[in-house]
Image (spheres, coloured by chain):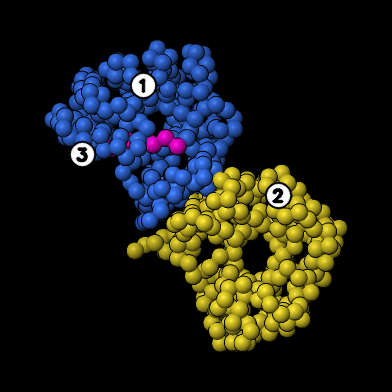
Chain colours: A blue, B yellow
Amino acid sequence: MIIIGEKINASLAGIKLIVQQRDRASLLELAKTQAAAGAGFIDVNVGTGVGSRDDEIVSIQWAIETIQEEVETPLCIDSADPAVLEAGLKARHGRPSLINSTKAKEKNLEQVVPLARRYNTPLIGLAMDEVGIPKTVGDRLRACENIAAACEKHGVSLETLYFDPLVIPISTDIKQGLVTLMTLAEIKKQLPGAKTVMGLSNVSYGLPGRTRLNVAFLHMAIYAGLDAAIMDPLDEALVGAVKTAEALVGKDRHCRRYTRAFRD
Amino acid sequence: MIIIGEKINASLAGIKLIVQQRDRASLLELAKTQAAAGAGFIDVNVGTGVGSRDDEIVSIQWAIETIQEEVETPLCIDSADPAVLEAGLKARHGRPSLINSTKAKEKNLEQVVPLARRYNTPLIGLAMDEVGIPKTVGDRLRACENIAAACEKHGVSLETLYFDPLVIPISTDIKQGLVTLMTLAEIKKQLPGAKTVMGLSNVSYGLPGRTRLNVAFLHMAIYAGLDAAIMDPLDEALVGAVKTAEALVGKDRHCRRYTRAFRD
């Protein structure tokens, strides 16, 4: 399973400051530690929630170029604004990356999917539509199918798509853990070739022992077919959960990675 | 999910001694602590591996009667020998219990299934046939279907069956974790109404960090539809895994049991 390092996200106060102050050393430190910990992609979200679109465009250019000068790991360009995504894609100067993300909203699809085609870059598609995150497996799957249809129309292959079934806290609706996992399993069945991706931590929001819930949810999701997770690659509990689950579902030949990690 | 307490098993040296010495106090202590920890059934296996069938028959009568004098929790009568199973069933004097087990071997089915009917007692069916434990999901499911057919023939309802998909160490064959989980999911799909049961710890045999693997496997199995587990009800890691997984799959209204367990 691919780990997408989540730590460079300017919605967090510390990262916001790094972006606003153009703190090159701290930004590189965050990228390097995540790369060294085994991240397959490093997410870069410079949306501080203040300032204009142009500010965010300048910030993403700075962040992408700064990281790429010293880090080889592909970057995951993360913004809700297609103009920011395109600025990030240009700034990476042809290096491999991942677009995060589009949802199944027509305006969004018409702007983001062509970027995946033009810049020949895989794309994360969120299982949500014009209204929001659907409550049922069927409606979430429909959102994914609509994204897949837009991709087909624009000549973007299903194999380059990562669908995110989306996670709602079980503290607000106890059924939602199962809805996410079943959506994930259905995506693997109904949209063969497409990959899946998930952020985990939302599932445990509002409950005690969050790591315990996140770890268990990751175990289940890997069994259900998860291909990538947006998470902290330095979180030993979660990284351990990935290695443990992959051994159990037969994705670790002779249990070598598992045994190397937990020999002691 | 129902926990079947596994601690009274005379293949373990300490328990063998308790059985051989008719150590009433120790036997009751084992039963009471498992009942207090929340076991839904207490497994009773008095096969010491030495001595005759008649010895085992006398032992099972002693164990069942002794435990039932002071413990209300139903007992799971565990033997490979149908004569021992019947002696245990008689000794329980009509109290609820569970038969552990039959496999899909004709001689076995002809002797054990009628006991389930005669004593009106649910039955564990193992996904193994004349030859042993099949390597594939299809063959394991076929073994379960053969057990289901024998039950139908003898008037035993599918609803009173607990199928065990069986667990082989992933250290001997990395694919076997997934084979067990997929067999479990197929049983729930193809034999609707039947329940599932599993012993877990075999999955991690020969590997370091066994608790970590057992916990992850339990998380996955509960997502796949596990109804009961043969395990140590005093093992906090495993019991915690049950509570965590049940919250995530929507079997814990308002996360009440989870929150009560992990509030601090």
Span colored in magenta? A1-7
Is residue A162 visible from the viewing direction of this image?
Answer: yes
The image quarter in which residue B51 lies: bottom right
Question: If the image is split into quadrants, where does the C terminus of chain B sit?
Answer: bottom left
* B4 versus A257 height, above or below: below
Q: CA distance from mark 3 to mark 2?
A: 55 Å
User: In the drawing, does residue A25 fall left or right of residue B262?
Assistant: left
In three-dimensional space, the C-alpha distance between marks 1 and 2, rounded to whole angstroms, equals: 45 Å
From the image, tell me which residue sits under label 1.
Answer: A96
Q: Which of A216 and A96 lies nearest the eye of the viewer?
A: A96
Q: Is residue A6 visible?
A: no
| Residue holding disc 2 | B134
Image spot of residue B114 (x, y percent)? 83, 67
Q: Is residue A4 magenta?
A: yes
Q: Amino acid at mark 2?
A: Pro
Q: Name the outermost residue toward the right.
A: B153
List the residue tagged with mark 3.
A13
A6 and A131: which is toward the camera = A6
Report the amino acid beneath label 1: Pro
